[in-house]
Image (spheres, rainbow, N blue to C red):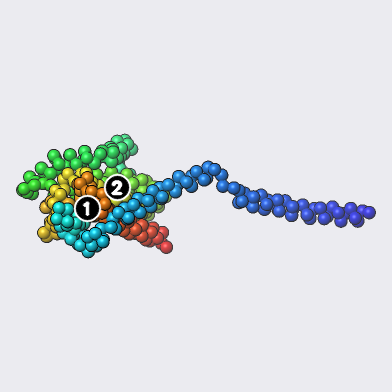
Amino acid sequence: MSQDTNFLEKTINEQQPKSETSSTESEILEIGKQKISWQKIILIIFASISVIIVILIFVFILINGLQIIPDFGLFKFLFGTDWNPEADQYGILHGVVGTIMVVTIAMVVAIPISISCSIYIAEIAPPVVRKILKPTVELLASIPSVVYGFFGLFTLVPAVKFIFKLPTGENALSGGLILAIMVIPTIVSITDDAIKAVPKTYREGSFALGATNWQTIRKVVLPAALSGITTAVILAFGRAIGETMAVLMVAGGASQIPKPFFNILVPVDPLTAIIARELGEASQGGTQFHAIFGIAIVLFLITFTVNLIGDLAIKRFTKKFRGA
């Protein structure tokens, strides 16, 4: 009888851990198999809305813009130099050249100024100065573009005309400078956040090795924040290429390709200015209407290409910095 009792107790003791383990495993499986709650469903729906909106916008532009190919011809549309709806001419090469010129001037001027300002705010400025300077710079982003247009038209344009002794100050240089002022807050804000996100240990390690403050900023902080800086430049480029009112008011609006093409002191007609000026006069379904949507497709493709190149650059810089 005692042997049977001992055998029974031994069996119970051996089975006890197994039951506890099996219950734990079943609880984990139950957690993994939990039903999707209504909160998750709502979040998924709202997260999908932005993607759906972008797709719908692109499809709408594509449907209306591709019609310019049978109406006018792809080659004539992309490489034609005359935009004259009255003569049924819808070439946009001058607009592409004007857009590239204005945006290039804006980025060349804005990037060094913005990054230098960000470095000062994030690494050098005293806390009191930082609290005043950063909100002041970011305040520039809230000013409407039409206000920038008026500022450029009555201040910047006369200055450019006087300095370069030109018959008119409405040209690519004026358009690029006003765009530079507009994109500076975007680059400064994002670059400052990227620099601030660099771990403090990076700076401490650099100082421990005997590096000066400037050497630490140049060789440690900026490489570590390079992906964020690249993102800031890409976003600024997107705003610059999509800006309408300011360039419409100060770029000159001349349907011509500069001769030579790098002459920044002649009036140009960026693509966004063409859309803003011509859309109100275009009859829906006509060739001019489709040509305007074709311009929108070109702008979309330019922005998409730049973003794609920027993403690849960010990944490459990140891998290089991490030693991968």
Q: Earlier in the sequence, mark 2 or mark 1?
A: 2
Quadrant in which the C terminus appears: bottom left
Between residue 21 and residue 34, name the one nearer to us: 34
Image-based side of 93 in relation to 239, left or right: left
Residue depicted at 32% across the width and 55% down the height: 63
Of circles 2 and 1, the one toward us is: 1
Q: Is residue 130 above or below residue 209?
A: above
Rounded to the nearest angstrom, the CA distance separating label 2 from label 1 is 36 Å
Percent from the top left, x then y, of residue 305?
Answer: 31, 58
Figure quadrant of the N terminus: bottom right
SS of the residue under disc 1: helix
Q: Nearer the viewer, residue 54 or 318?
A: 54
What residue sits 17% from the left and 39% below the top? 150
Rendering quarter of residue 121: top left
Q: Residue at x 11, y 52 (%)?
A: 266
Disc 1 target residue: 288
Q: Is residue 31 left or right of residue 15?
A: left
Q: Are marks 2 and 1 in contact (CB under 8 Å)?
A: no
Image coords of residue 125 (percent x, y): 30, 41
Crowd around label 2: few <14 · some 14–19 · many ≥20 (10 Å): many
Q: What residue did someone put label 2 on?
A: 187
